[in-house]
């Protein structure tokens, strides 16, 4: 279940002086409070939505919504609201999402560079993920010569690439290696039969 919605929080208070109160008929100080509303996901703020506020006469304690304020008080309220900025933490969820996206992009680029190196320089012990006929499995590199790569197959397959770790166990590999030329080995990566390399 995804928990999302919006929430309000007090973000500013300011006193404005010498404004006539329509209720107690006094020229008094009014306290204007501003509340910010923000969208959240799992209670983590994503971004600000709106700002609203109220005023309170410090003499008679009458609290007013903007539509109930007289013109001088309404003008003061608008000025306070305009000068009140939403807190930066209202953007914390968005900043987190952007940060994770940047990290993911960088990690992906680093992995791509690493893969190019691994493909060009196969090494004994490399685990090669592959897909065939809609199923996924692995090969283990047992030896590398100047022109060939020797692989033993995993005896098991699985229907999701992300679950390959479940079958990547030493006892699941056969004892009989098959040889591929370095060119064939690289071509299998080019045509996406071989998908990834894990170098332990």
Image (tube, helix red, strand yellow):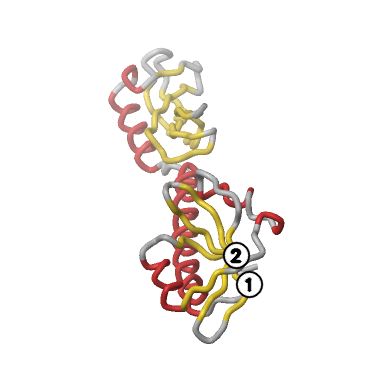
Sequence-wise, the earlier of marks 1 and 2 is 1
State whether residue 99 is above or below residue 53: below
Considering every residue shown, the one lying at the far front of the view is 176
Q: Position of residue 80 (x, y in %)?
A: 39, 37
| Residue behind mark 2 | 152
- Residue 88, numbered label: none
Q: Position of residue 93 (x, y in %)?
A: 49, 44
Q: Residue at x 43, y 14 (%)?
A: 24
The secondary structure type at the circle numbered 2 is strand
Q: Residue at x 41, y 24 (%)?
A: 27
- Kindly report the distance in space between the C-alpha atoms of the residues bearing marks 1 and 2: 7 Å
Q: Residue at x 50, y 23 (%)?
A: 58
Which sits in the foreground, 113 or 95?
Answer: 113
Q: Position of residue 185 (x, y in %)?
A: 46, 72
**Quadrant of the image containing the C terminus:** bottom right
The secondary structure type at the circle numbered 1 is strand
Residue 29 in sight here:
no
- Residue 142, numbered label: 1
């Amino acid at each position: 279940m995804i928990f999302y919605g919006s929430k309000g929080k007090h973000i500013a208070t300011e006193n404005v002086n010498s404004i006539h109160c329509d209720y107690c008929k006094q020229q008094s100080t009014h306290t204007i409070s501003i509340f910010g509303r923000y969208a959240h996901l799992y209670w983590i703020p994503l971004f600000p939505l709106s700002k609203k506020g109220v005023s309170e006469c410090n003499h008679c304690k009458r609290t007013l919504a903007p539509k109930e304020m007289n013109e001088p008080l309404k003008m003061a309220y608008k000025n306070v609201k305009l000068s009140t900025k939403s807190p930066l933490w209202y953007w914390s969820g968005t900043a987190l999402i952007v940060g994770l996206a940047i990290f993911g992009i960088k990690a992906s680029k680093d992995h791509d560079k690493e893969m190019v190196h691994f493909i060009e320089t196969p090494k004994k012990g490399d685990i090669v993920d592959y897909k065939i006929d809609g199923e996924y499995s692995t090969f283990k590199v047992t030896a590398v010569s100047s022109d060939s790569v020797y692989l033993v197959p995993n005896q098991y397959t699985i229907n999701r690439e992300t679950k390959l770790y479940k079958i990547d166990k030493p006892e699941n590999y056969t004892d009989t290696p098959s040889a591929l030329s370095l060119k064939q080995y690289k071509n299998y990566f080019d045509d996406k039969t071989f998908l990834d390399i894990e170098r332990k």
